[in-house]
Image (tube, rainbow, N blue to C red):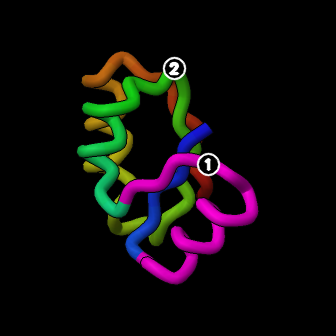
Amino acid sequence: MTACDTTEYLLDLMAKYAEVGTYSDYRETLEQEKPAAALIATPSKFHSKMVQAARIANCRVSCER
């Protein structure tokens, strides 16, 4: 499992306690990890470009409203 967030503190906690790979850029996550699925939970104004990037990367997407 991999997590992506722009908050370095949160990424540090997830890496340490949840033992997941972490990224701060969703594009890098898609390129490096090539996930089969993605959950997008960001402010709505970012949804479109993130969903589009995930679909181009042939990734199934679930996006919060």
Q: CA distance from mark 1 to mark 2?
A: 16 Å
* Residue closer to the observer: 16 or 59: 16
Of the residues shown, which amino acid type is indicated by label 1? Val
Q: Quadrant of the C terminus?
A: bottom right
Q: Is residue 1 above or below residue 7?
A: above
Could you tell me which secondary element the residue under label 2 belongs to? loop
**Identity of the residue furthest to the right in this view:** 17
Q: Residue at x 64, y 73 (%)?
A: 13
Which residue is at 67% across, 52% downward? 19
Report the magenta residues as a range.
Answer: 7-23
Tell me whether circle 1 and circle 2 mark residues in contact (CB < 8 Å).
Answer: no
Q: Which residue is mark 2?
A: 36
Which element type, helix, strand or loop, lies under badge 1?
loop
Q: Earlier in the sequence, mark 1 or mark 2?
A: 1
Residue 30 in picture, x, y percent from top left? 33, 35
Residue at 36% from the left image edge and 17% from the top image edge: 58
Circle 1 packing at 10 Å, graded few (<14), some (14-19), many (20+), is some
Q: Residues within 10 Å of mark 2 (few under 14, many from 20)?
A: few
Name the quadrant containing residue 18.
bottom right
Dot 1 corresponds to which residue? 20
